[in-house]
Amino acid sequence: MGEPGFKVVPLTPERWPDLEDLFGPKGPCYGCWCNHFRMPQKRRMPLLGEGARLLFEERVRKGPPPGVVAFEGDMPVGWLQVGPRAHIPEWNNPRRASTPLPDAPAEDERNWAASCFFVRKGFRGKGVTADLLDGAISFARDSGARLLEAAPMDHEFKRSSEGLYVGAERVFLRAGFSEIARQKEGRPLMRLVL
């Protein structure tokens, strides 16, 4: 667990206002609202902003929870999209670092992915990401997942902090993940068997 120990809970409909507060009025990552891996770019780009927000709110309302939210007290401070690979089809694209391996097909809803992080400014570098991942592992395990995969940035890959929305390799290593493939430079495919 990171310091100071953030509370992490699944994003259920009653927690939607917390996510809106965390993401802000425009949403993170140029108004993506965590739809990046949910649909092809051609369909996603016209929705950026309010359209993306409405689409993701509907997804949360319908369930199951598409990820976990970290809190310091009552303040939402971080988000991690985590759930079955099947729910984020673009993450399974054959040209990505996250392309599924034959032993863990995307169609099997027990094969989960931790795909997108967002941490509130002022809380970055304080252990939120590690606590989000710990909470995501518990959520995946409790939901019947057999494994959890990620395609983070490795320690040698130089990117902006915004590019770290996929997470940093070191956080996954500390949580017990192992590299199982490297399909793109700087982006290991990592797995934790649950």
Image (cartoon, helix red, strand yellow):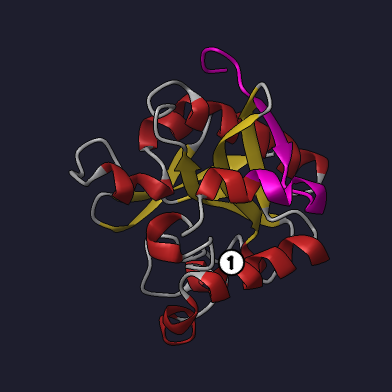
Residue range (magenta): 1-18
Tell me: residue 67, above or below residue 4.
Answer: below
Q: Residue at x 64, y 73 (%)?
A: 55
Residue furthest to the bottom: 42
Q: Which residue is nearer to you in this view: 56 or 144?
A: 56
Q: Residue at x 38, y 67 (%)?
A: 96
* Residue 62, x across and y down, in percent: 81, 66
Q: Which residue is mark 1?
A: 53
- Residue 38 visible in the current orientation: no
**Number of labelled discs?**
1
Q: Is residue 39 left or right of residue 167?
A: right
* Residue 186, x across and y down, in percent: 25, 49
Tell me: residue 50, above or below residue 175.
Answer: below
- Residue 19 visible in the current orientation: yes
Q: Mark 1 packing: few (<14 Cα in 10 Å), some, or many (20+)?
A: many
Q: Residue at x 44, y 30 (%)?
A: 171
Q: Which residue is nearer to you in this view: 88 or 124?
A: 124
| Residue 16 located within the stretch drawn in magenta | yes
Q: Residue at x 49, y 32 (%)?
A: 129
Instruction: Tell me where residue 160 sits by quadrant.
Output: top left
* Residue 91, x across and y down, in percent: 49, 66
Residue furthest to the front: 25
Instruction: Tell me where residue 68 sits by quadrant.
Output: top right
Please state, as top left, top right, bottom left or bottom right, where the C terminus lies in the image. Answer: top right
* Residue 180, x across and y down, in percent: 44, 48
Q: Is residue 30 left or right of residue 74?
A: left
Give the amino acid at mark 1: Arg
